[in-house]
Image (cartoon, rainbow, N blue to C red):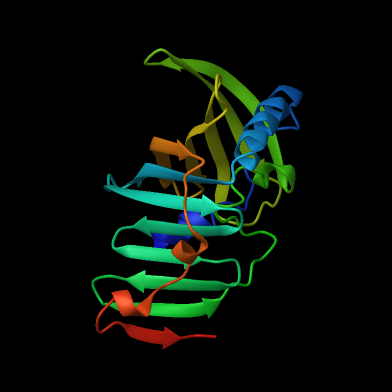
């Protein structure tokens, strides 16, 4: 289950078989519009569905939610709560009633939820694939291909609402055949949240074991 959360926070780095990808100006315009949309919001909340499909017919589905405010975020998924205030990260595991506390030390190749809407600007090629219609809405589909050929992930596919420029879904493709799907089922822009939401309150978790990793 930890891998699910890790994939959401550190999503993409790689390239392999999609050699046709380039810096497509149409794709760039779509991505720029999406990025501007999210950057204009002081904060937002999203509920999403996560699905893993593996070549051996394994299929796992779960739901989660995330709140983002500037460089801060709180992610809840599969009994885990990951809180990042921009300098400290708390990872709370509900079943074990323990929380790991570490310094936030971002790597330039890492992608956390506060960067997903601008990550295409460095280290990626991108191409426009198609427009698709679902339930009366039109979505623009764009592939992002990391320029680094070494890591496992070789493609990320985004579906962006043509009208309001919000991200409907993204799919992560690995060389081993695994596919990870994240689909937004509810989106709340300008979600009102206080800064203390992005820190872990030990007093609200009776008997919690604090594991200090800093």
Task: Tally the numbered discs.
Answer: 0
The quadrant of the image that shows the N terminus is bottom left
Name the residue: 28% across, 63% down: 79
Is residue 20 visible to the viewer in this orientation of the structure?
Answer: no
Q: Is residue 207 left or right of residue 83?
A: left
Q: Is residue 96 left or right of residue 19?
A: left
Expressed as whole percent of the image width and height from the top left, the position of residue 95 reads: 23, 72
Expressed as whole percent of the image width and height from the top left, the position of residue 175 reads: 51, 48
Q: Identify whether 164 is placed above or below 172.
A: above
Q: Is residue 25 left or right of residue 41?
A: right
**Relative to the observer, which residue lies in front, 209 or 52?**
209
**Relative to the observer, which residue lies in front, 182 or 150?**
182
Expressed as whole percent of the image width and height from the top left, the position of residue 82 reads: 43, 65
Name the residue: 74% across, 27% down: 24
- Quarter-wise, where is residue 125 in the image? top right
Is residue 146 visible to the viewer in this orientation of the structure?
Answer: yes
The quadrant of the image that shows the C terminus is bottom right
Name the residue: 63% across, 72% down: 105
Q: Identify whether 214 is placed above or below 170.
A: below
Q: Identify whether 193 is placed above or below 182.
A: below
Expressed as whole percent of the image width and height from the top left, the position of residue 160 reads: 54, 28
């Amino acid at each position: 289950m930890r891998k699910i959360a890790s994939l959401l926070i550190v999503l993409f780095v790689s390239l392999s078989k999609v050699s046709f990808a380039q810096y497509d100006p149409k794709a760039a315009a779509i991505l720029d519009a999406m990025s501007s949309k999210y950057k204009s919001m002081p904060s937002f909340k999203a509920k999403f569905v996560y699905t893993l499909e593996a070549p051996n017919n394994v299929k796992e589905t779960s739901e989660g939610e995330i709140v983002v405010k500037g460089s801060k975020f709180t992610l809840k998924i599969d009994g885990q709560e990951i809180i990042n205030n921009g300098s400290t990260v708390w990872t709370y595991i509900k079943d074990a009633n323990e929380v790991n506390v570490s310094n936030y030390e971002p790597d330039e190749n890492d992608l956390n939820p506060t960067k997903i809407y601008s990550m295409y600007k460095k280290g990626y090629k991108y191409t426009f694939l198609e427009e698709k219609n679902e339930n009366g809405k039109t979505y623009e589909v764009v592939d992002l291909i990391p320029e680094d050929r070494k890591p496992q992930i070789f493609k990320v596919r985004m579906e962006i609402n043509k009208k309001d420029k919000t991200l409907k879904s993204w799919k992560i493709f690995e060389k081993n055949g695994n596919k990870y799907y994240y689909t937004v089922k509810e989106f709340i822009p300008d979600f009102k949240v206080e800064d203390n939401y992005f820190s872990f309150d030990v007093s609200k978790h009776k008997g919690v074991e604090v594991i200090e990793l800093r």
